Image (cartoon, rainbow, N blue to C red):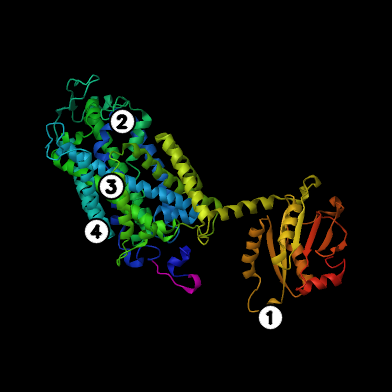
Amino acid sequence: MANENSPLLAYRLLGEEGVSFPASGAGGPGGASARKLSTFLGVVVPTVLSMFSIVVFLRIGFVVGHAGLLQALAMLLVAYLILALTVLSVCAIATNGAVRGGGAYFMISRTLGPEVGGSIGLMFYLANVCGCAVSLLGLVEAMLDVFGADATGSSGLRTLPQGYGWNLLYGSLLLGLVGGVCTLGAGLYARASFLTFLLVSGSLASVLVSFVAVRPRDIPLTPRPGPNGSSLPPQVGHFTGFNSSTLKANLGAGYAKDYTTGATMTFASVFAVLFNGCTGIMAGANMSGELKDPSRAIPLGTIVAVAYTFFIYILLFFLSSFTCDRILLQEDYGFFQAISLWPPLVLTGIYATSLSASMSSLIGASRILHALAQDNLFGVILAPAKVISQGGNPWGAVLYSWGLVQLVLLAGKLNTLAAVVTVFYLVAYAAVDLSCLSLEWASAPNFRPTFSLFSWHTCLLGVASCLLMMFLISPGAAGGSLLLMGLLSALLTARGGPSSWGYVSQALLFHQVRKYLLRLDVRKDHVKFWRPQLLLLVGNPRGALPLLRLANQLKKGGLYVLGHVTLGDLDSLPSDPVQPQYGAWLSLVDRAQVKAFVDLTLSPSVRQGAQHLLRISGLGLQPSSPASSRSLLSASIFLNPGTGVCAVSERTLPAPLTIWLKFKCWTLPWWHEAQHAGPGFLR
């Protein structure tokens, strides 16, 4: 985006270049007409469905059966503590002003800059793409467990053929359904999500009622293969109803082999599975371009969704520990169907959560991609993602994402990518925490969020916990994601990005430099640590490059300032003619590859201008006291390329040695004035 507006622009208080911006339409796809979603439909519903995913129906028994109730509750508290810290940062940034389309990408890029924001935004986009594919493949497998030709158990209907090609066909058909809903717009997606939310809520309600209404029963388990290919003796799980003995037996951990993979479970592996199902807190923020009031809807809706899902998870953990023995929990992860009053309703909930998770991932990915394309960070490669409909729906980004998901589906099973997807999500969460931390540490004047339940401590703890969780889940994926982020950042740095976004790094540098400048005490100055301070007065920059580099070599780690005097009187001019020249002088510094500052001044005469520059250039240090003054040489040297040194004057000053070098320019009158003035010109 060529122009960025401050939060004031969103409230019609200020415009750039005389342009007024609407209060609700800045930056979203299609402008204000596209912002139609309420807090409940745009944030609460997609966030709840994303945080539930398929874990709430098929992994409650896995977590409680292996970890026990106490460790399961500890895992849940730790997971939601990490998520809550990130939610606090999201709320702070979202309530700081106008939030455009792109959700987390917009928040990160406008704080940390296009290099970091673009790299993390692309990784977050890929995470949503792979997450959509994983949800679709999970839905296919759940359907084939019941309707597949190779389905096991007495409940299998065995009607759908199976195999790689068939599974790919089923996944592609489901992706076409999901892509069609997302292509038709956020309104249809919101209505479909609401219908899915009702189905999931009904399924969960039936499960909760079943824990109380169903009588104790024995549940036969599917025979498992033995070590030599033979089947093990059939086992029976027990639903005991509310029983204190069952609860006591389920309190402690009992890690065993996972019957689906054969791997022995540990605290880290079980925690990773639980945390994978909770990484959906950005689903509402990704819809920022379609929300009526994103600054209010994102914080409120996300907090409500996190609190609701946390309560449901705790309730299911307690009910499962009270009523189901460990054999049932460890050997049948889908035991909700076996204890349900109406098993098809539970099956409907499983399918609905998988379908909603895939829709949320696809539409979230399309919004992130559309924001990336609008910012032109990756060039023409993302140009198709800029296309939007008359209603403001970025259908080009949806089709682009649909194609990538289809490619990912060709890989078949994506269990190995599940950890990578979660790590990518955690990288984005850590970046949001880092953005909020940077704004808080920089004391940026434009960072005034209305949400105040955060501090730099929560932000720092959020960054640390996300990084720790990344390496706990998958050290290889964590290292690879950080390496990928570094490569993408280097690519974007080489391409060059927008300079009008306002980087928090500049605010942090100013904050630190100011702090340390104030600590420079001239009374503690010592000759052992003296450094030269050079002021080079340049008349004609076109031929001054050799002299600029010579003075740069003389500075030896000291202060180097380029000065220039423009003749004139500000009282008789309509505007300051000096300010527009700074950009050209900074470009000269870049071209000369010197480490120098630039000081320009406007004065009626060169003599007065040079005196101004001599007084304002430096680190702001006052001369030493007379008692501690040092007799140092101060020389004014005028260099003439033709004749060498024109004049030298010496005097004793209680200040560091300063050398002024002036480059001859015959076209400027002040050079002739300096020649006629003699050695005392600058005294």
Read off the residue under disc 3: 357
> Callout 4: helix, strand or loop?
helix
Coordinates of residue 208 in the picture (x, y in percent): 20, 39
Q: CA distance from mark 3 to mark 2?
A: 27 Å
Q: Earlier in the sequence, mark 2 or mark 1?
A: 2
Q: CA distance from mark 1 to mark 3?
A: 67 Å
Q: Earlier in the sequence, mark 3 or mark 2?
A: 2
| Residue in view at x 40 percent, y 58 percent | 373
Q: CA distance from mark 4 to mark 2?
A: 40 Å
Question: 246 or 298: nearer the eye?
Answer: 298
Coordinates of residue 433 in the picture (x, y in percent): 46, 47
Coordinates of residue 45 in the picture (x, y in percent): 28, 52
Read off the residue under disc 1: 572
Coordinates of residue 431 in the picture (x, y in percent): 46, 48
User: Does the stretch in magenta take in 436?
Assistant: no
For the residue marked with disc 2, what is the amino acid?
Leu
Mark 4 or 2: the one toward you = 4
Read off the residue under disc 2: 69
Read off the residue under disc 4: 188
Mark 2 or 1: the one toward you = 1
Q: Earlier in the sequence, mark 1 or mark 3?
A: 3
Q: Quadrant of residue 65?
A: top left
Q: Earlier in the sequence, mark 1 or mark 4?
A: 4
> Callout 2: helix, strand or loop?
helix
Q: Earlier in the sequence, mark 4 or mark 2?
A: 2
User: Does the stretch in magenta take in 22?
Assistant: yes
> Callout 1: helix, strand or loop?
helix
